[in-house]
Image (tube, rainbow, N blue to C red):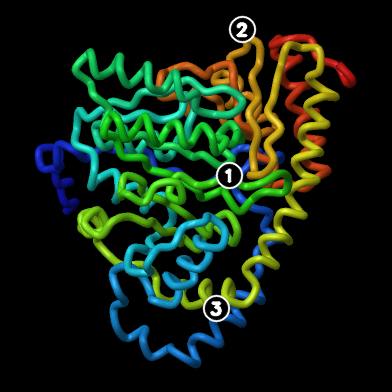
Amino acid sequence: MATQTFDLSNIYSKDSVDTELRVPVHAKYDFATAQPDPDSIPFKGLTDALSTMLEKQGGDLAFYPDTRGIPELRELIAAKLERDDGFKVSPDNIAVVNGSAEANFVVIKALVDPGDTVIMEHYVYSGTLAQFRKAGANVVGTPIDDDSIIPEELEALIVKLTAEGKKPKLLYTIPEFQNPTGNTLPTERRKQIIDICRRHHMVIIEDECYTDLRYEGETQESFRSLDDSGMVVYVGSFSKILAPGLRLGYFVSDPETMRRALSFRMTGTNHFTSLAVYEFLNREMYKHIDYINVINRPKRDAMVAALGENFGGTGTTWSTPKGSLYLWVTFPEHVNATELMPIAFKAGVGFNSGASFAPNGDGDHCARLCYGYESVEKNRDGVALLAEIMEREGSFKVSPGG
């Protein structure tokens, strides 16, 4: 006799959501995700590093590690931050977690209550935007230009929201190679923003997971290097210089914020992966960073050139970032990239509409195109195919050479 299906409909928690399970799928030309070239992943270096560390410390896998991650990796991060970002921090103030996504998640949980107002860039990384919304935050985008956040506009927004009884609690920003625009916030603006946030008693969450991916120009001074009062929580990641599948990131904060943030973790960081990443980076971190940036620059150049060849004269504009894995495209207002996404994907081109990055609910006429995953040739061919698709769909008339 068949067993009657048990009805859990009145048992599920009020906060649980029946979410569709997503299996990763890739278009022929995958410009949708900011992921590295698979050929750039140092498989042999990582396996050799892991072998070395297992011989030295393999027995430690029998124990649960420090909640903040293994000491060696935190010490390496501290040295890297002093060298690259200009600030000294004790390894005790660094927590290694499962990617920058978890770093942002636990920091958000430690700082944000439902109904709190937070400010982000007008367009901002969709994953963190979703995290703030799931936390019940009132998320507001602040105006940006080619140099990212405009300090005067930020302060005007803070004053307006405060007058409405929605005083912002924090600013979340990706200052170096902002995702999705690729823009970098100049040091002078960062200094002004620190002063603004200090006056209005706001925390700054500085997400610098793309900062190593620079192949032109100079890295700007980090917020954390400009202020050590405790108002800046710094988030970093190894996903973009190694591989997202390793799931290793970290955050830097004052001791109490760290303790409160880590209280939301259910489990520690993968000790096995940490051993491999520590030893590999200890051996050849900067050599590898240089290598991936040499790979990425011609990919960016190919995509920018292809946009000029295929979208010139259509009223379309795009950013030319000095690093990162993506660029931002703004189509004429009548183009609806959100509606175009599934059509383009089916025809072979994957990308993300600007609407998914928009706290204020706009962005349908924009798109983020990621160039890091595909080859130089596929970046060129994929952009040309996207132009063909858009012409076929009546978005506008496009032709090679504009």
Badges 3 and 2: C-beta atoms under 8 Å apart?
no
Mark 1 highlights which residue? 220
Q: Is residue 369 above or below residue 287?
A: above
At label 1, the amino acid type is: Gln
At label 2, the amino acid type is: His
Where in the figure is residue 109, as x and y percent of width and height?
Answer: 24, 45
Direction top: furthest residue? 334
The residue sitting at 88% across, 21% down in the picture is: 400
Direction left: furthest residue? 10
The residue sitting at 14% across, 47% down in the picture is: 6
Mark 3 highlights which residue? 279
Q: Is residue 204 above or below residue 80?
A: above
At label 3, the amino acid type is: Glu
Where in the figure is residue 169, as x and y percent of width and height?
Answer: 26, 33
- The part of the image, by quadrant, that contains residue 201 is top left
Foreground mark, 1 or 2, reads 1
In the displayed structure image, the side of residue 69 where residue 247 appears, left or right: right
Where in the figure is residue 393, as x and y percent of width and height?
Answer: 69, 14
In primary-sequence order, the first of circles 3 and 2 is 3
Which residue occupies the foreground of this view, 389 or 324? 324
- The part of the image, by quadrant, that contains residue 30 is top right
Direction right: furthest residue? 401
Mark 2 highlights which residue? 334
For the question of whether residue 105 can be seen, the reply is: yes
The residue sitting at 83% across, 43% down in the picture is: 377
The residue sitting at 66% across, 66% down in the picture is: 286
Q: Is residue 116 above or below residue 391?
A: below
